């Protein structure tokens, strides 16, 4: 998959390094264009940043929920008729991580469960998340389970409060936000549960059009943006900050006025000359 094929509204995380100083920036995909992926603008002290060196990019694609990690060629600010944005370019093909892992969906609903078929002693639990292969449950402080125990879980979900029943087996113990939890494999993937997972998937990954101009279609918006990018990819104003030097060097910080730096050096020189003159006067007195 090309970077331009990333879905609208996908979360974008950029990892960059400046002489050993790591920075992380968050933004959001607008839509793909022929040159790359248009994302919301990123600023530093009111100026747009440009990454002329390759940077690590992580994107959670809204269409399929998968995470893509790749190396960008450049990330530069672009000026369009709709305002300033950033354009991410990459020459490499994007491959999803954990392609075999089943997508998990948050549920966070109160349920009851029986342990090893003991239906006379039901326990409270919270169904934290669920997938086609398993689910995570948060337990109360009084419920004791171990790896290999069979859990029969019931909970209601949705506007109609439909009741779901899941048979599972404990495969691991862990914590969720400091609370005791268990990870389970699902033994009976029934029709009701498949329908619930399909509904959650459609809700989470429904792609919506980006309306920079509601008067025209997204396809026409993309065409207009591509025309603007072809005219001027790096805007002349406002100024940009190039991520390529030592960020601690005042001469590389564009938000520090050059006049202030020159005046500081001039003051230091005058102070040194005054000190030398004072020393000569002290020797004359002797």
Image (tube, rainbow, N blue to C red):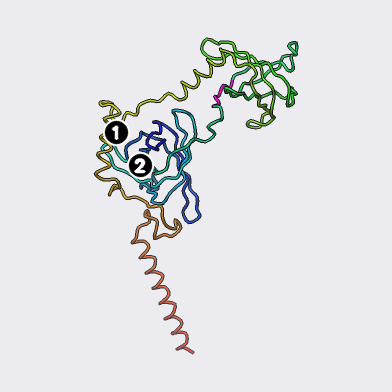
Place of residue 252 in the rendered image (x, y in percent of width and height, measured from the top left): 39, 58
The magenta segment: 103-108
Question: Are the residues flagged by discs 2 and 1 in contact, CB closer than 8 Å?
Answer: no
Look at 74% across and 14% down and name the residue there.
117
Q: Residue at x 43, y 49 (%)?
A: 54
- What is the tally of numbered marks visible in this picture? 2
Crowd tier of the residue under label 2, counting other residues whose Cα lies within 10 Å: few below 14, some 14–19, many 20 or above: many
> Closer to the camera, 165 or 212?
165
Where does the N terminus fall, quadrant-wise? Answer: top left
Label 2, secondary structure: give it.
strand
**Spatial distance from mark 2 to mark 1, Cα to Cα?**
13 Å
How far across and how far down the image is residue 184, in percent?
66, 24
Q: Dot 1 corresponds to which residue?
A: 222
Determine if the magenta segment contains residue 84: no
| Residue 250 % position (x, y) | 41, 59
Residue nearest the observer in this picture, 281 or 222 = 222
The residue at which mark 2 appears reads as: 87
Horizontal arrangement in the rendering, residue 24 relative to residue 4 (left or right): right
Q: Residue 112 appears at what percent x and percent y?
A: 67, 15
* Left or right side of 22 for 122: right
Task: Please report the residue visible at 39 percent of the width from the left and 69 percent of the height from the top.
Answer: 267
- Mark 2 or mark 1: name the one nearer the start of the chain: 2
Classify 234 as above or below 180. below
Q: Quadrant of residue 152?
A: top right
Give the image quarter of residue 171.
top right
Disc 1: CA contacts within 10 A as few (<14), some (14-19) or many (>=20) = some
């Amino acid at each position: 998959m090309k970077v331009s094929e990333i879905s609208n509204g996908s979360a974008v995380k950029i990892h960059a390094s400046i002489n050993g100083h790591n920075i992380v920036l968050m933004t959001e995909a607008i839509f793909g264009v022929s040159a790359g992926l248009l994302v919301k603008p990123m600023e530093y002290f009111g100026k747009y940043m440009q990454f002329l060196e390759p940077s690590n990019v992580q994107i959670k694609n809204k269409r399929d929920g998968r995470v893509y990690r790749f190396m960008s060629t450049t990330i530069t600010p672009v000026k369009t008729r709709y305002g300033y944005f950033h354009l991410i370019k990459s020459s490499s093909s994007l491959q999803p991580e954990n392609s075999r892992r089943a997508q998990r969906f948050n549920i966070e609903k109160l349920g009851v469960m029986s342990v090893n078929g003991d239906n006379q002693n039901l326990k409270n639990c919270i169904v934290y998340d669920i997938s086609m292969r398993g689910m995570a449950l948060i337990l109360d402080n009084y419920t004791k389970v171990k790896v290999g125990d069979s859990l029969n879980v019931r909970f209601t979900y949705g506007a109609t409060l439909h009741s779901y029943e899941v048979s599972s087996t404990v495969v691991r113990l862990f914590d969720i936000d400091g609370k005791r939890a268990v990870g389970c494999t699902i033994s009976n993937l029934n029709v009701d549960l498949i329908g619930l997972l399909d509904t959650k998937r459609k809700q989470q990954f429904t792609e919506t059009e980006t309306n920079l101009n509601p008067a025209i279609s997204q396809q026409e918006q993309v065409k207009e943006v591509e025309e603007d990018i072809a005219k001027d990819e790096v805007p002349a104003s406002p100024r940009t900050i190039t991520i390529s030097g030592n960020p601690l060097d005042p001469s590389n910080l564009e938000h520090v006025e050059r006049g202030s730096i020159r005046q500081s050096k001039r003051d230091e020189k005058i102070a040194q000359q005054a000190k030398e003159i004072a020393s000569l006067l002290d020797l004359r007195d002797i």
